[in-house]
Image (cartoon, rainbow, N blue to C red):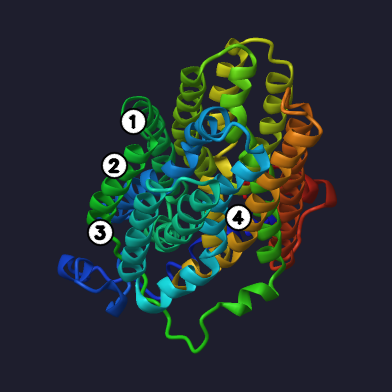
Amino acid sequence: MSIADSASIGAEHGAEKASEKQPSTSSTSLESSTSPDTHDQKTIRPADTPFGWIPTLAVMVNYMFIFGASNSYGVFSTYYLNEKFVGTSATTLSWIGTLITSLMLGCNIGTGALADKIGYRPTAYIGTVLCTAAYILASFAKEVWQLILSQGVLFGIGASFLIAPSLSIPPQWFNKYRGLASGVAVAGSSFGGLWFTAATQAMIDNLGSPWALRILGILTFAVTSLMNLLYFRRVPARPRKTLFELKAAKRLIFWLISLEACAMYTGYWALTFYIGTTARQLGGTMQDGSNLLLVLNAGSAVGRILAGVVADKFGNMNTLFVSLVLTVVIEMPLWMKAQSIGPLYALCALYGMISPTFISINPVIVSTQFDTDVLASVMGMTNLFAGLGVLAGNLSQGAIFDKYDHREQFTNTIIFSAMFILFSAIVVFFMRIHVLRKQASSVEITTNKPSIITSMLFKKI
């Protein structure tokens, strides 16, 4: 057996070890799948069944409201920066959007463990209540600090309760189409960004920002409450004495995934937060900024699904590495050299299609490296570092825009963003080498050195 064949078998076993750790039973009934309290579930349900798309699509809808808020925050950011709080620094205003995403991801270290301990649905319903309260309280805010506490802090914490079970549902229900399922689920964030962006802009223009926030709160409560009912586990949670899965931190792959997520999130949000202001600087209007966000989210919706399909065919880490490098190649020239609105549309379309690949693929990589019954906990731990990346990145970008770009152009902000995305690609490259070496060490090497090198270069992983 060649190393390529042996490594392929090892990869397949690694990808399915968690979900097939205990044998699936064909006798599992639909009644078991739809039991009122999935946390009390005692049996493992079959993978790759049509039923798995029910919780996956529920996650997709909830993602519309979880990430739709952060993906469309550019509308609020442009409004706050150019209309409501004109004298306030970009750094101060960036705290709102920064806290939404950083707390959504960072607090996941606790909410992810909680989801594995008390169940997916109770955790998700806590998030529904907190997110709704955040919108309503923000609608009465008169000062920036009030928006930071409500639209930023409270919504971010609430979203972390919703995202905790959502992240681990699609990977555990599928083996063969794991990448596709994850891509379809996270595409909901882009679809949400599409209609959130258009709806928010229209409501601000016609009803004012207070009523825009109240309506978003009502919609969030109604829709996520319904979708939470469809949050079914495939693999029962493992009884545990501790809240966190501390054994994961003893593995190098955990730290590589965490470092990649931290670096990527540090640079990722610059375009979303500042594309509207870029359009204004080039002679555009607030509507142009809103339209650019629509294009960005439309491209992202397509890209996240395609990323899952491509990853299933060519490998998760391979796809992730190429997409990160292409993101840098697209972002720097198109944004930095833009002299009119036209190139910004091309930038948003391409960046939207390619850059969010990591959002689709990271949960799949985690699911292939760790046991399914602790996925929410491990993803929560890695997301702590993602949240730190959002916090550091967005605040740094705001400071760079104020101090070094003098709120007149974005050259230094773009370089900062691109370099961190490039660094995340380098981390993925070393992650790939680490996994390949682990696979190679577990099989007998019977081929010559050139064949081994070729296998490692082109291996699907």
Percent across and percent down for residue 6 are 64, 59
Q: What whole-number distance in Å separates the C-alpha atoms at marks 1 and 2? A: 9 Å
Mark 3 is surrounded, within 10 Å at the Cα level, by few (under 14), some (14 to 19) or many (20 or more) other residues, namely: some
Q: Which residue is mark 1?
A: 203
Q: What whole-number distance in Å separates the C-alpha atoms at marks 1 and 4? A: 53 Å
Q: What whole-number distance in Å separates the C-alpha atoms at marks 2 and 3? A: 24 Å
Mark toward the viewer: 2 or 3:
2
Q: Residue at the location (66% across, 38% down)?
A: 89
Q: Which mark is residue 8?
A: 4
Whichever of labels 1 and 3 marks the residue nearer the N terminus, that label is 1
Whichever of labels 1 and 4 marks the residue nearer the N terminus, that label is 4
> Which kind of residue does numbered mark 1 sit on?
Met
| Viewer-side residue, 269 vs 396 | 396
> Which kind of residue does numbered mark 2 sit on?
Ile
The image quadrant that residue 88 belongs to is top right
Q: Residue at the location (40% across, 31% down)?
A: 194
Side of 192 where 418 appears, left or right: right
Tags 2 and 3 touching, CB below 8 Å: no
Q: What whole-number distance in Å separates the C-alpha atoms at marks 1 and 3? A: 30 Å
The image quadrant that residue 64 belongs to is top left
Q: Which residue is mark 2?
A: 215
Q: Which mark is residue 230?
A: 3
Please, what secondary structure does the residue beneath circle 4 have?
helix
Mark 4 is surrounded, within 10 Å at the Cα level, by few (under 14), some (14 to 19) or many (20 or more) other residues, namely: some
Which residue is most to the left? Answer: 31
Is residue 423 something one can see in this rendering?
Answer: yes
> Which kind of residue does numbered mark 3 sit on?
Leu
Whichever of labels 1 and 2 marks the residue nearer the N terminus, that label is 1
Tags 1 and 3 touching, CB below 8 Å: no
Q: What whole-number distance in Å separates the C-alpha atoms at marks 4 and 2? A: 51 Å
